[in-house]
Image: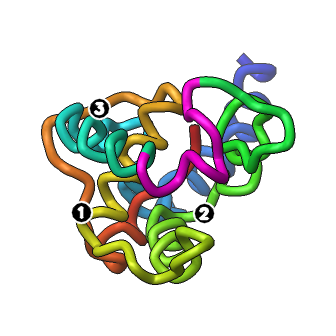
Amino acid sequence: MRAVLRFSGAAAPVLVAGVVVAAPPQEAAAPSVRDGVYTVEQADRGEVLYDDRCAVCHGAIRQFVPGMAALLGDHTFRNFWRGRSLGEMFGYIRETMPQDAPGTLSPAQTAEIMAHILRGNRLPAGEAELPDDEEALSAILFDP
């Protein structure tokens, strides 16, 4: 009995601390590219745009071409964007692409191209289209 009391006495502060110190509320995980944030139809439209406006510099998205600014294949793209928001990616593409005519893609075209890039990186499609708004996209993390 005495050993049990000693054990209970040693365990009591832990129990009391667990009751007294409340755990912080769990925040909902941020939406992620793994949650299906674009539609197949949107990626299909993006593929047409990509082939027309992007492939000359980046190559075909489904194959890695040495010497091209690859968007998949060598993991450089994934490593560069990992942990960043899709809002950052959207802003970067809108402001700097295509290289021969920066800033000429509409918000909708940019989102469609991004959907194609996400699909090319084997990230799942979903039921809702990727927003064409940088602020809304800032809530979605690129964490493949």
Please say if the residues under marks 3 and 1 sit with CB atoms less than 8 Å apart: no
Q: Nearer the viewer, residue 52 or 80?
A: 52
Residue drawn at point x = 36 percent, y = 73 percent: 105
The residue that mark 3 highlights is: 125
Residue drawn at point x = 77 percent, y = 22 percent: 2
Q: Does 54 appear in magenta? A: yes
The residue that mark 1 highlights is: 131
The residue that mark 2 highlights is: 84
- Numbered disc 3: secondary structure: loop
Q: Nearer the viewer, residue 3 or 86?
A: 86
The circle drawn on residue 34 is none
Mark 3 surroundings within 10 Å by alpha-carbon count, few (fewer than 14), some (14 through 19), many (20 or more): many
The stretch of residues the image draws in magenta is 52-62
Tell me: residue 58, above or below residue 136: above
Frontmost of labels 2 and 1 is 1
Where residue 46 appears, as percent x and y from the top left, is 32, 46
Does residue 8 appear to the left or right of 91 in the view shown?
Answer: right
Does residue 9 appear to the left or right of 101 in the view shown?
Answer: right
Residue drawn at point x = 42 percent, y = 50 percent: 52
Q: Give me the C-alpha separation between circle 2 and circle 1.
A: 16 Å
Along the polypeptide, which appears first: circle 2 or circle 1? 2
Where residue 84 appears, as percent x and y from the top left, is 60, 63
Q: Give me the C-alpha separation between circle 3 and circle 2.
A: 19 Å
Give the residue type that dot 3 points to: Ala
Mark 1 surroundings within 10 Å by alpha-carbon count, few (fewer than 14), some (14 through 19), many (20 or more): some
Residue 29 visible (yes or no): no
Quarter occupied by the N terminus: top right
Q: Give me the C-alpha separation between circle 3 and circle 1.
A: 13 Å
Along the polypeptide, which appears first: circle 3 or circle 1? 3
Tell me: residue 120, above or below residue 33: above
Tell me: residue 87, above or below residue 71: below
Give the residue type that dot 2 points to: Arg
